[in-house]
Amino acid sequence: MIRLFKHYIPYPVIFLGLLDFMLLVLAAEMGWVFRAIQIEMEIGSIFDRPAPILSFALALQLALISVGVYGAEALQSIRFAAARILVAISLGVIFLSLMAFLLPGITLWRSNSLYAMIFAITLLMGIRILLGALLDSDVFKRRLLILGAGPKANRLAKLEKRQESGFIIAGYVDMNEGPSLIPSAMKRQGISNLPGYVIDLEVSEVVLALEERRNSLPVADLLTIKTTGVHVNDMSSFIERETGRVDLESVNPSWFIFSDGFSSGRRISSAFKRGFDIFLSLLLLMLTGPFILLFAALIKMESKGGAFFKQERVGLYGQNFSILKLRSMRADAEVAGQAVWASENDPRITRIGRFIRKVRIDELPQAWSVLKGEMSFVGPRPERPQFVDDLQTKMPFYAERHIVKPGITGWAQINYPYGASIEDARHKLEYDLYYAKNYSPFLDLLIILQTIRVVLWPEGVR
């Protein structure tokens, strides 16, 4: 994986993304040339028209990211990739239209764009057909050696079997710290030279999955391994990198203290984030105001009660604030204000409410909270005070999610469905902690783009 602005991106995604961008540039140029030949216009050089060519490539690249073209399923299924590429091209039309409106003259002519999109579909699908097997092969996967053979090592063995796994476990070493769950593990006493064993296996990383480090950590060997250029990592940091979440089963307070993240150097990023929040919330309120009023009227017509409702939530540093949302449940959904977990096919949700939840329209009035500075567009989902009080007693590090402003969308929201239980809340907390620890404007942009995918394909959203 490559770490870009504190966020890890798999090698196949980087490789395919760069290749796609070059192909989109080629498609834009081919569209220009094809149209120029049609109308008998002088073709000239590609360097004479950098803005239209690059704006086309950038708009479609953002659309590809937005619809999940670089997800695990799209990398492993040509049919899945084809469907997402077609949707991305349609979305690219919207992005290009916005560019043409905001910066007239920067985009291709409409006739050029039409031909360029046809060429883009052909080139993007062609490269996936040619490289399909390569992208899903072991070429891009790292070889690991796991020190440990107990429950932690067994968890890594299960992680390796995931569809999106980016690594191969070349071997396990039983460090004699308890019962072994890995039958193929080599006994430590059977390896006379651990650094030499690492070199023989041609691994690029050693992961510590020890149940008890006090008497089993081979410090001298690990130092030698590290100085030979092989990366040495602890299990918690490894899982964070591979899954995009903080693993609550393996972390402890010292890991939070000594691992990177929570940088004070993000003050500039925070200022940028606030400026972006103000701009986007004003723009969103102006553009979606008529839709908010339309659905408010439909809600009033369908069921008794107000179209909007206020609800107390926990925000930055644990301070309470009120959010404004379109009502998606019956007015009597909560008796005496008692907080109740939302569930799949919740009978309290109205017909209009089910639709506005599915496409996230109920969240739009929260842009007012963003404008006031109580929320951000990107951040952990703000929870009810009753839930927070309960969850803080049942899971560690829950309070740490409040070191960043809550958001309308977030890393947990695009990676995990709405929480409907304590276990769901625990999984979402792992993603929230990853965001709080690794926040950057780049990650915010990625989340905003991926939110489009969640709206278009609301897998698991309730």
Image (spheres, rainbow, N blue to C red):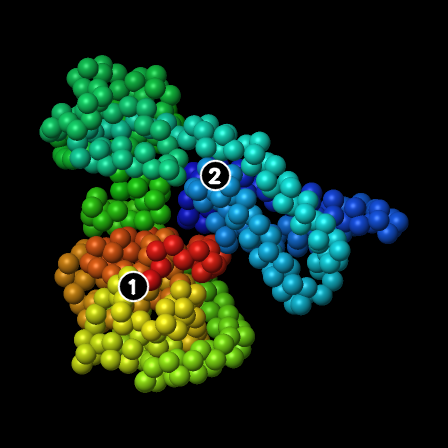
In this rendered view, identify the residue nearer to me: 239 or 91. 91
- Residue, x 54% and y 39% (percent of image)? 16
Please determine whether, in this image, residue 304 is positioned above or below residue 274.
below
Please tell me whether mark 2 sits on a helix, a strand or a loop.
Answer: loop
Q: Cα distance, mark 1 to mark 2? A: 30 Å
Residue type at numbered disc 2: Ser
Which is closer to the viewer, label 1 or label 2? 1
Answer yes or no: is residue 414 visible: yes
Please report the residue visible at 11 percent of the width from the left and 28 percent of the height from the top: 179
Q: Position of residue 347 (x, y in %)?
A: 27, 69
Determine the secondary structure under disc 1: loop
Q: Is residue 386 left or right of residue 120?
A: left
- Residue 277 horizontal/vertical position (percent): 47, 69
Going by the image, does 416 lie left or right of 27?
left
Query: Pointer 1: what residue?
Result: 345
Q: Position of residue 309 (x, y in %)?
A: 33, 80
* Residue for point 60% across, 52% down: 89
Q: Residues within 10 Å of mark 2 (few under 14, many from 20)?
A: some
| Tag 2 residue | 77
